Structures are given as C-alpha cells and as structure tokens.
Amino acid sequence: MNIIFTLNHEPIEIDVDPAELLVDLLRLRLGLRGARPGCLRGQCGSCSVLFNGALAAGCLIPAFRAYGATILTIEGLMDTPDYQDIEKGFIRANARPCRFCAAGKYLSVHALLESHADPTDESLQDTLSGVWCRCTTHQRLARGVRYAADFRRRRVQRGR
Ligand code: FES
Ligand code: FES
C-alpha cells in the first residue's frame, strides 16, 4: 500500500504493509530511532510522536494511518529552538530525560507549550503522567517544564 504524508516537515511517499506499525516504519525503515518500543500497549510513552499535532503512541497506529497526516518525531524537533528551550529547562531542573523516555517527554512538553504558554498545574500533571519514568520526581519534571516555558516565552518576546 502506497502512502504519502509529511514527516518532520518533509513530504514522504513509501510502500507499507497493512500490518506494519508506525513505530516500526519510523525506526526500522526510515532510521528514526528516537521513538522506542517499550510496553507496546500505548501506556509508557516511549514510542511517542506528534500526529497532526497531538501526542500519539506509534505502537498503536498502523503505518497506513499516516496517509495524509503530518508527523513530527523527536528527530524533527531536535534542531529547533523549541527543543533547546525544553532541554535547557530540564537541565536547569536536573531532570534531563534518558533515551528511553526522551521522545515522550520532549514531544509531550512541546505539544503542551504550543497550547499553553504558561501551563497550569493540571495540564502539567496530564502531560507528565503520559510518560513512564521512575528516575525523578513529578515536582522536578514540572519545574523543568516551567523553566522551559520561561525560556520559550522570553525567546518569543525577543522575536527569535
Ligand atoms: S511502546 Fe508505545 S506506548 Fe509504550
Ligand atoms: S529519565 Fe528516562 S525513564 Fe526516567
């Protein structure tokens, strides 16, 4: 089955198997290894992508569903100032993600900050609970996201 979609800001056309999962298409055939298979049940967040702007689990989505969609992976976010803001926020809070949870944390925080420049406690709770991590506390992660929001707001005010 031939599909066309937008991946990390570029158009792509590729043949997919009807049983192929999006996370496998990205990792095994397109070399985008930031989305990682974990629970394979849509719960851990390690296979996260932004699918038409919303956080989605690549382990639950058949690859053919990408037809006509706009998909952003952590690789597509990585070279942007938005990513740098989030990274600086996590570093300042001493909560830098490992490779297992990075896609879920960076992409979910990016989606949050796109819709909430100054996130509420409730939106932070919702966002951070979608990605499994026992290495750090919710408070520390939340502090990192607030720092990231500050970095982003100040950068946007400077027009960058
Ligand atoms: S591997 Fe997809 S949510 Fe856990
Ligand atoms: S920092 Fe990655 S799972 Fe906790």
Image (cartoon, rainbow, N blue to C red):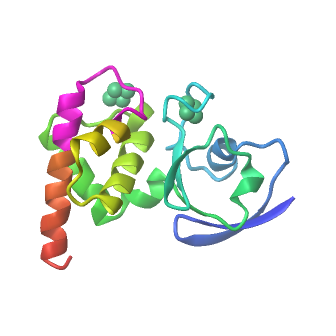
Among all residues in the image, which is located at the extreme top?
A: 134
Q: Which residues are magenta?
A: 128-144
User: Which quadrant would the C terminus be assigned to in this image?
Assistant: bottom left
Query: Residue 6 placed where, x, y %?
Result: 61, 68
Q: Does the magenta run of residues contain 82? A: no
Question: What residue is drawn where x is 63% and y is 43%?
Answer: 23
- Residue 65 placement, left or right of 156: right
Q: Position of residue 1 (x, y in %)?
A: 87, 58
User: Does the segment drawn in magenta span residue 142?
Assistant: yes
92 to 38, vertically: above or below: below
- Where is residue 98 shown, x and y percent of the image? 35, 32
Q: To which quarter of the image does residue 99 belong?
A: top left
Asked if one can make out residue 9 in the rendered structure from this viewpoint, the answer is: yes
Q: Does residue 37 appear in this view?
A: no
Task: Tell me what residue is drawn at x 55 percent, y 62 percent.
Answer: 52
Q: Quadrant of residue 7?
A: bottom right
Residue lying at the far bottom of the rendered structure: 159
Q: Residue at x 78, y 64 (%)?
A: 3
Q: Nearer the viewer, residue 125 or 20?
A: 125
Apparent side of residue 84 relative to residue 94 in the rendered image (left or right): right
**Where on the image, by quarter, is ligand 1?**
top right
Q: Nearest the camera: 65 or 97?
A: 65
Question: Where in the figure is residue 17, as x and y percent of width and height?
Answer: 84, 48
150 up-or-down from 60: above or below = below
Count of all numbered marks drawn on residues in the image = 0
Residue at horizontal 16 percent and vertical 34 percent from the top:
94
